Each structure stands twice: as structure tokens, then as C-alpha cells.
Image (cartoon, rainbow, N blue to C red):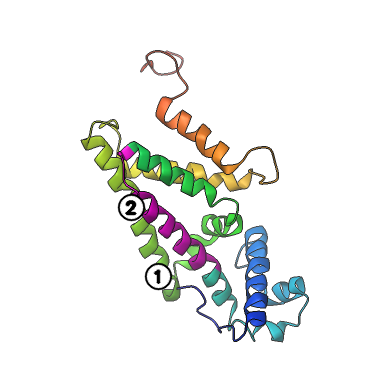
Amino acid sequence: KPGRGRQASSPLASERRGNLVRLAAELFAQKGFQATTVREIADEAGILSGSLYHHFDSKESIVDEVLSSFLDELLRDYQAAVAEGGAPDEILSRLIRAAYRSLKPHRAAITVVQNDWNYLRQFPRFDYLGTVEEQIQDIWIDVITRGQAAGVFRTDVDPKLTYRMIRDTIWVTVRWYRPEGALTTDDLAGHFMTVLFDGISLGERSTSPAGS
């Protein structure tokens, strides 16, 4: 659960805590979790290093809150997309839109996931990362499998591999997407689904090796 460090005792303390989490998340995304120091987080927040420990007991507690908050929200969004019901392709479309919507509010957390996931997974306090990862994976695989059984999706593609390719394609978008630009996350989701469901080729695909 979010907030495994010290808990805020007042609305003002809670606001300061939230600001520290946002600033730290940006530093973790820019420099990597291991390279970011408590002093740098405190300097960014304009406070003394010792003052940071009034809100968190360690740097690990801060990144814990960054990741658990993101993953808890993402899991809830995915569960809501499935609970809404409908055909498998409709549910898959909602999952994709939910994933793209997370890019703007959780850009830093997604970057930390990509860069520091394997390192953090070494420590027992981050065991929940694997648990949530499996829960999310099961949601997507179940929808894809149901679509195959219903004749909506091709049966010659592996559901797990398909999910991982979709996931990685979406998450890597944080490296170039700019929320202040002309494209919205709904625009990105719509374009991605056009490519995913309709493809980019016209006519039958050749199976001959390139250059043969």
C-alpha cells in the first residue's frame, strides 16, 4: 500500500508530503533511483535533508509511494474497464485507453518502472511489484484469450506475448510523448488501436524472407 514511511499528521503535512513525492519522482526518472540522493531531493524541495525525514523514513519509502500509488490506480482502472463488460475487443480498447491515460499523471513513475524495476525487485519490501504485475498481466491475458475463444481475435498469436508487446509499446511512449503538445493520450490510444486492430498493410502479407 502507498505510504509505507512516516504518515502525514495534518492537511498541510500531507500537502508537503505529496509535493516531496512528486519532486522525488521527477529526480528518480531523470537520474535513476540509485543515483538520486536524499540531499538532492531535499535541495529540490528547498528544505534541509533532516526535514525530509519528518515525512519519510528513507529514500526507499519515497519510491515505494511513487510506485504503489501508480500501480494501485492503474490496477483499479483496469478492473473498472473489465467490470464495464462488453465484447472482448471493446474491453481491450478500454484497457488500452486506460494505459495511455496514465502517461500524463504518472510519467515519472512509469519511467522509474522501466529503469529501476529489476533493481527494486531484489528487496523484500518491493515484493508487491511482482504481485501487482501478475494481477495486471492476468487481466489482459484473460481478455485476449476470451477474444480468441469468441472468434474476435486471431488464435495464432500468443496472448502473453501479445500483452507484453502492447504494454511495452505503450510504456516506452513516455520517452518521447509531450503532454503539452498537440497530441492527447486519447489521440495516441486511437492511433495505436488503428495499427493494432487494422494493421498498416493493404492486401495479403508476404511470408517470404526480406531480400529473397
- Left or right: residue 45 versus residue 15 is right
Question: Which percent across, then down, holds residue 121?
Answer: 44, 66
Crowding at mark 2 (Cα within 10 Å: few <14, some 14-19, many 20+): few
| Residue that label 1 marks | 127
Callout 1, which amino acid? Asp
Q: Please tell me whether residue 184 belongs to the stretch shown in magenta.
A: no
In what element is the residue under mark 1? helix
Residue at image coords 63%, 80%: 11
Residue at image coords 67%, 64%: 27
Q: Nearer the viewer, residue 45 or 13?
A: 13
| Cα–Cα span, label 1 and label 2 | 27 Å
Q: Nearer the viewer, residue 185 or 209?
A: 185
Compare marks 1 and 2 and give the one earlier in the sequence: 2
Q: Give the number of the disc on residue 66.
A: none
Question: Which percent across, then down, holds residue 31?
Answer: 66, 61
Give the vertical position of 162 relative to 197 (above or below): below
Q: Give the number of the disc on residue 83.
A: 2
Question: Which percent across, then down, holds residue 193?
Answer: 46, 34
Crowding at mark 1 (Cα within 10 Å: few <14, some 14-19, many 20+): few
Quarter of the image that includes the N terminus: bottom left
Please tell me in which quadrant of the rendered image residue 37 appears.
bottom right
Callout 2, which amino acid? Ala
Q: How many marks?
A: 2
In what element is the residue under mark 2? helix
Q: Nearer the viewer, residue 37 or 71?
A: 71
Residue at image coords 28%, 31%: 152
Question: Which percent across, then down, holds residue 76?
Answer: 41, 59
Bounds of the magenta span?
Answer: 66-88
